Each structure stands twice: as C-alpha cells, then as structure tokens.
C-alpha cells in the first residue's frame, strides 16, 4: 500500500488498516499485482496498476510523468530472500507487464535503482533493479538521478530476452 497512499497516510495506517485497504482492492476485482510461486509457496510479488492509482508517484518530485501518455506502473516488487539471485525479478516484471497489456495498457513503466555504480542492500531495492527491467524488455527513457531510471516497455516490445 505504500505506493498507493501518501507517505504520511501510509505511516498512519500501518498494519491492519493497510491490510484492509489492499483487501478492498482485491475484492473489487482489480488485482493489485502478480504473484510468483515455487512449489505452491509465494516467492515473488510485483505491484502493477494504472499510474493514477499510485499517489506516491503522483506526489514524487523525481518521478513526475515524462509525457501525457497513459501508463501502467510497477512501483515495487519483492522476492523472498530464499529465491533471490534466481532471475525472478525480471520474470515478475515481465509477468506484470504482460498482465497490464492483457488489461489494455499500451505502456508499462518502472522506476528501478541503477546499481551499476553502487551496491544496494536487498531491502532497499524494492523498486527493482535496472538490470531486471532490461531483461524484461524495458528501456531507459529518463534518468532523474544517477541511481534512478524511469524505464518503459511498450506493448509491441519483445518479452524477456533469452540471455
């Protein structure tokens, strides 16, 4: 829920209230993301939805819209510690993009960290990594800072590379 609310609202509704809010979204029939499983256990999560659903993005100074195109956004993802370094991030991002395209999106956007010049601790990579988005067919369209990229994948783009 952190991307869906203003930061002050998120802090004030931690725990039960945020769980109720996410359940309300699920109950509305609008899945808030995609989940990856391994042997029946959830191991990957990727949030996806129309950008307008994410107040945190709308209020961000560095992640303002780059044009007037309607986009779906991937504001965060999570991979279980036991499954990191297994290419699941790029697979989760790819699955989220495919889901968005199946719902009519033409452009999917992500805001990953660029770790090529700096090592990030896993817990701080919750917006993803540039390399994972690249493997899922995304291209950098803007760099609001040296460590952050705005990346896009268009419906006509190729899926995960075979690399």
Image (tube, rainbow, N blue to C red):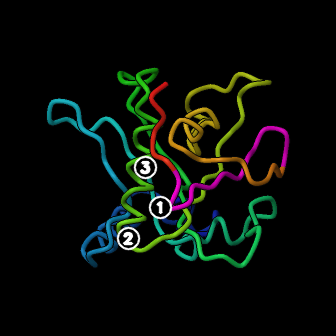
Spatial CA distance of label 3 from label 1 is 12 Å
- Residue 134 pos. (x, y %): 59, 38
Residue drawn at point x = 49 percent, y = 47 percent: 158
In which image quadrant can residue 7 be found? bottom right
Pointer 3 or 1: first along the chain: 1
Q: Main secondary structure of the magenta part?
A: strand
Q: Which residues are magenta?
A: 145-157
69 left or right, relative to 100: right
Q: Secondary structure at mark 2?
A: helix
Residue that mark 1 sits on: 1
- Residue 57 pos. (x, y %): 66, 65
85 left or right, relative to 83: right
Vertical arrangement, residue 131 with respect to residue 159, above or below: above
Vertical arrangement, residue 126 with respect to residue 22, above or below: above
Residue drawn at point x = 74 percent, y = 54 percent: 141
Q: Nearer the viewer, residue 162 or 89?
A: 162
Pointer 3 or 2: first along the chain: 2
The image's mark for residue 46 is 3
> Badge 1 local density, few (<14 within 10 Å), some, or many (20+)?
many
């Amino acid at each position: 829920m952190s991307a869906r609310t203003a930061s002050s609202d998120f802090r004030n509704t931690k725990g039960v209230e945020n769980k109720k809010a996410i359940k309300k979204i699920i109950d509305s029939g609008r899945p808030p993301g995609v989940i990856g499983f391994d042997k029946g256990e959830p191991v990957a999560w990727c949030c996806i939805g129309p950008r307008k659903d994410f107040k945190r993005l709308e209020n961000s100074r560095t992640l303002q819209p780059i044009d007037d195109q309607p986009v779906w956004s991937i504001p965060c993802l999570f991979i279980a510690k036991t499954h990191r370094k297994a290419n699941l991030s790029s697979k989760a991002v790819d699955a989220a993009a495919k889901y968005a395209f199946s719902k009519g999106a033409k452009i999917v956007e992500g805001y990953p960290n660029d770790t090529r010049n700096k090592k990030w601790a896993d817990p701080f990579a919750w917006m993803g990594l540039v390399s994972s988005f690249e493997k899922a067919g995304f291209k950098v369209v803007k760099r609001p800072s040296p460590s952050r990229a705005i990346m896009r994948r268009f419906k006509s783009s190729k899926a995960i590379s075979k690399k």
